Image (tube, rainbow, N blue to C red):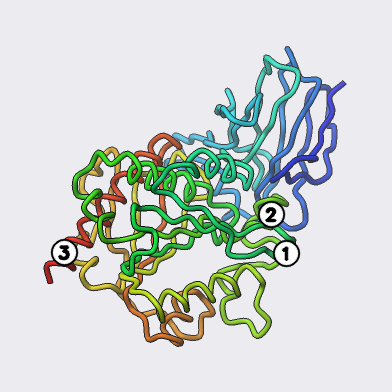
Amino acid sequence: MITFDADFENASLGQVTQLAEDWYQIGLRPDTAYWTHFRVAGCKGREITFNLTCVARPHGNRWGIVDTGKPEDPDYSCRNPYFSYDGKTWHHFDHAAAYITMPNTVSFRQRFEEDQAYVCYTIPYTYADLQTYLARVGDHPNVRVESLGQTRCGHDVPLVTVGPNPDAEDVLFFISREDSDEPTTNVALEGLIDCCLAAEDPSVARMLETCAIQIVPMVAIDAVICGSPYGGPYDVMARRWLDDELLPEIAVIKDHVRCLVNERCPRLIAKIHGGQTYDNRPVWDFRIFDRALRKLLPKQPATPLHPEWNPFVRDAVPWVRKLTIFETWLQQEFDWWNFFSVHTNGASPEQLHRQGTHFAQLLARYVEATDAA
């Protein structure tokens, strides 16, 4: 007997309808237009087909449906979703494609080798994954993990400080994962932290002699846990920074930033976003206000693309102050312009992790350039 459930962290599943033997329509929860993450049991040795209908075509395109632009030579395949037998090692489905006779619908099929499998829109990175990683690096002498406070649902908001001088006046401060459905962010940050701890790159080691790196690795914690894209019950977290009644997780981050600005010497403040899935071009688009950092990056992606990492400045247009976002708050409260945001993109978790090393090296170049100015 085939059964479905969503009784685990980050799960998201609507109504499931059996269409025929080993053929199921996967319903979406009302809080999402495309995201799903569920567990299927009783599937060993059976080839099961799943159909899923997105709310609208733009969300259907998030499933990576190939558009050749050639009606005479269509390719309806798509890169999502993924499945896993243990929730750790993830694989592409053998068959995944647009379902031609139903608009905004994808169909994916797999013959399973184990009795239980997890199915997710992408390779997830959960709050539990973050806690596992922080436990692994937390005993390193150059890492300090602490809690800034708790989310509205009572989960700790971690702050990670990296470097031999955690209380150094000079700080590079990052927030990340404002949107629940951007798991590439955390994988890239793991690469950044691991590079700093390895102490193999001389420029990164020199940076850490004078600078501490501080990271809030996950802002939308409640949304990640309940399996809701963006900010979950709080809609888009990026628009919550100027609310009259702040979410507790945002309030504690703002208080920490005030302490940094008033008591220490932050050199950069930034936010790290990511892709909703993998199999993307390895292009990182930086929106930068800091002039020194802008000078270190090209204005366009490399042509042809480098196979590993392609950072570029996406735009230099000042943010509209009406937008209630993190950088707007920095500008309004501190007239702060040493800021950037970036979207991390790559083909696989392994590539995103390697890109974290390139990111650490870019930060080291920035520190060297501003020291020399």
For image coordinates 22% across by 61% down, the residue present is: 366
Q: Which three-letter amino acid code belongs to the residue tagged 3?
A: Ala
Secondary structure type for disc 3: helix
Q: Quadrant of the N terminus?
A: top right
Count residues near mark 2 (Cα–Cα under 10 Å), then give few for <14, some for 14-19, many for 20+.
many
Task: Look at the numbered discs 2 and 1 and tell me whether their residues touch, using CB distance below 8 Å.
Answer: yes
Pointer 1 residue:
233
Left or right: where 163 falls relative to 222: left
In the image, what residue occupies the spot 41% across and 51% down? Answer: 344
The residue indicated by pointer 2 is: 228
- Image vertical order of residue 155 relative to residue 135, above or below: below
Label located before the other in sequence (1 or 3): 1
- In the rendered image, which residue does mark 3 sit on? 369
Counting from the top left corner in percent of width and height, residue 79 is at: 52, 36
Which type of secondary structure does the marked residue at label 2 adopt?
loop
How crowded pointer 1 is (Cα within 10 Å; few <14, some 14-19, many 20+) is rated as some
